[in-house]
Image (spheres, helix red, strand yellow):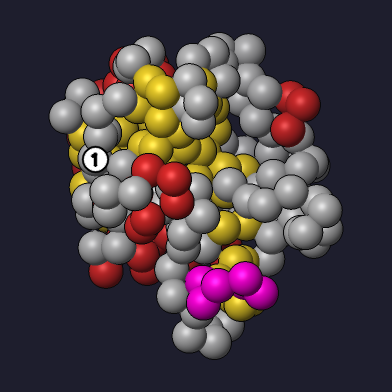
Amino acid sequence: MKRISIVLSLLACFIFTSCEQEIELVKIHTDFGDIYVYLYDATPIHKANFIKLAKSGFFDGTTFHRIIPNFMIQGGDPNSKDDNINNDGEGGPEYKGEPNTFKDPNSNTYTIAAEIKPDIKHKYGSVAGAREGDDVNPEKRSSGSQFYIVENKNGTPHLDGKYTVFGEVVYGMDVVEKIAAQPKNNANNRPMKDIKMKVEIIKVKPSALSKKYKWTMPDHK
């Protein structure tokens, strides 16, 4: 009887693992290593937008154009592909009237509606949408593509409620720290050497992430 019980337990475990639903994970490749990011279901507009852009190759060749040690690194601007360092931070995806997008009044790019959740904080490794200030953007809409990763080990609580946090780093914060520590132009916090990225969407099982990286899915997902 004991043997049968053990066999049934092993069989149930095998069935559960085999049937476990895969989740989509963002893989950001850089010369310093790879950063893996989980996007929250609680912020569906940001999640869908980021996945769409990643799958289209939009982010490939863009750079982390703004780095501030003990704070954050920022990237995702298509302007960072050109030789003009003065327009970095001003670009975004082209506006085509798609749902949940709003045309920027000063360009043909789009922003997306804020999805600020009181229970999702700016912790170490949080991924959030960059945006223009409240004076021109009182709705706190996020850039269509620019994002930042919190590099401060204590988080950045002063940003809570002001920017949409839509994901978190599963693995690769050592890469984020290396990027943040690179030599930069102090006038605009731009790295002296381009830090390019290539972004893709991969599918993994949560149990594999837990086993390999000791990461568990957040309660708010």
Q: Position of residue 76 (x, y in %)?
A: 40, 50
Residue found 39% across the figure and 38% down from its top = 65
Q: Position of residue 20 (x, y in %)?
A: 32, 51
> Is 98 left, or right, of 215 in this rendering?
right
User: Looking at this view, is 91 or 23 the one in front?
Assistant: 91
Q: Position of residue 170 (x, y in %)?
A: 39, 31
Residue 50 lies in quadrant? bottom left
> Is 20 left, or right, of 138 in this rendering?
left
Q: Position of residue 28 (x, y in %)?
A: 28, 41
Residue found 36% across the figure and 57% down from its top = 78
> Which residue is disc 1 drawn over?
196
Looking at the rendering, the stretch of residues picked out in magenta corresponds to: 104-109
Residue found 73% across the figure and 33% down from its top = 159
Principal secondary structure, stretch drawn in magenta: loop
Residue 56 lies in quadrant? bottom left
User: Looking at this view, is 76 or 160 the one in front?
Assistant: 76
In the image as oriented, which residue stretches furthest toward the left?
31
- Classify 10 Å Cα crowding around label 1: few (below 14), some (14-19), many (20 and above): many
Is residue 5 shown to the viewer in this render? Answer: no
User: Looking at this view, is 90 or 139 the one in front?
Assistant: 90
Quarter in which the N terminus is drawn = top left
In the image as oriented, which residue stretches furthest toward the bottom?
97
Q: Please name the amino acid that badge 1 sits on.
A: Lys
Q: Is residue 35 above or below residue 199?
A: above
Residue found 48% across the figure and 85% down from its top = 96
The total number of labels drawn is 1
Asked which secondary structure carries label 1, the reply is loop
User: Looking at this view, is 63 or 98 the one in front?
Assistant: 63
